[in-house]
Amino acid sequence: MIDTHSHIDGSEFAEDLEEVIQRAQDAGIKKILVPGICLKDTSRLLQVCQTHAGYLYPMIGLHPENIMDEDYNYVLEQMEQIIRSSIKNETNVPQKNTSPIVAIGEIGLDLYWDTTHKQEQIEVFERQIGWAEKYDLPIVIHTRNAHAEMMEIMERHRHKNLCGVFHCFTGTEEEARDLLSFPNFMLGIGGVLTFKKSTLRDVVKNAIPLSRIVLETDAPYMAPVPNRGKRNESSYVKHVAETLATIYGCDIDHIAFQTTGNALKVFKKVTFFAKN
């Protein structure tokens, strides 16, 4: 299995990172993808992933909730320089002890708290989509209370060979079908699926084929049952897989095989650099 979204570089894991990684490996998690959310934490993100090259893989992105923390034009310039330098240093032959930037993320729109900076969020989102097109990288999209706005933006890029993940999907059947209309995108399914009162199980059963799902934890947030309320970590992704197995009426090995394949379709650099 692959945890396609874990903030394992965060301060929540600073004291026991090695133990968290070991538990993930013991639980059968073969790779962990680590999203970026701001510039100030990027060096820590890259350092943690480089220290665990071949197991942790970084993404670079400016999260919509962080766009006003600093001058976002400066932040975007610096982030793109990091991406450009990373790609320049890569060769056509996979190198051992390398942890390449595998995606642009976590990016998107978040209008949950207020809409004050909606236009800035849209601008930043579109600019980062432009990186994905320019550097041939997938995108990992965060959307909260902004489905219509996100769809409008994505429609403008529908025919530009984008691929990626709609992260932390918890929406309706109609919203699922909207997102699935983008054939090169997967839906990220995490701990909410296991919650007793969640409607996501029915949405998955009725509207989302297993061939379009990737597993994620969004650790340290939204831990699945039976660990709900605790710090989430990558080893808990097995609980999401178990719930999917119940929904689809198959064994967990099939879930692991299919979702891993789905992840590798999107995050092609993981496949390329994992050969060594």
Image (cartoon, rainbow, N blue to C red):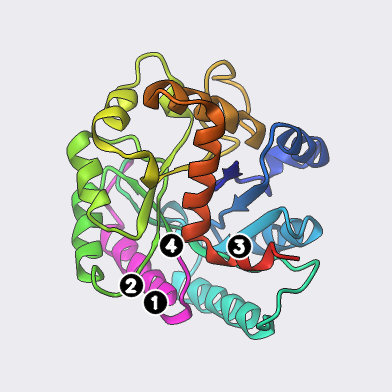
Which-is-in-front pick, marks 2 and 4? 2
Which-is-in-front pick, marks 1 and 2? 2
Q: Which mark is residue 106?
A: none
Gap in Å between the C-alphas at discs 1 and 2?
A: 8 Å
Residue 217 showing in the rendered view = no
Gap in Å between the C-alphas at discs 2 and 4?
A: 11 Å
Q: Is label 1 in a helix, a strand or a loop?
A: helix
**Mark closest to the chain's N terminus, 2 or 3:** 2
Pointer 2 local density, CA inside 10 Å: few below 14, some 14–19, many at least 20: few
**Mark closest to the chain's N terminus, 1 or 2:** 1
**Which residue has dot 1 on it?**
133
The image shows residue 207 at horizontal and vertical percentages of: 24, 36
Relative horizontal placement of residue 106, taking residue 23 as reference (left or right)? left
**Mark closest to the chain's N terminus, 1 or 4:** 1
Which-is-in-front pick, marks 2 and 3? 3
Residue 42 showing in the rendered view = yes
Q: Is label 4 in a helix, a strand or a loop?
A: strand
Image quarter in which the N terminus is found: top right
The image shows residue 261 at horizontal and vertical percentages of: 51, 50
Q: Kindly identify the amino acid type of the residue bearing the numbered disc 4.
A: Ile
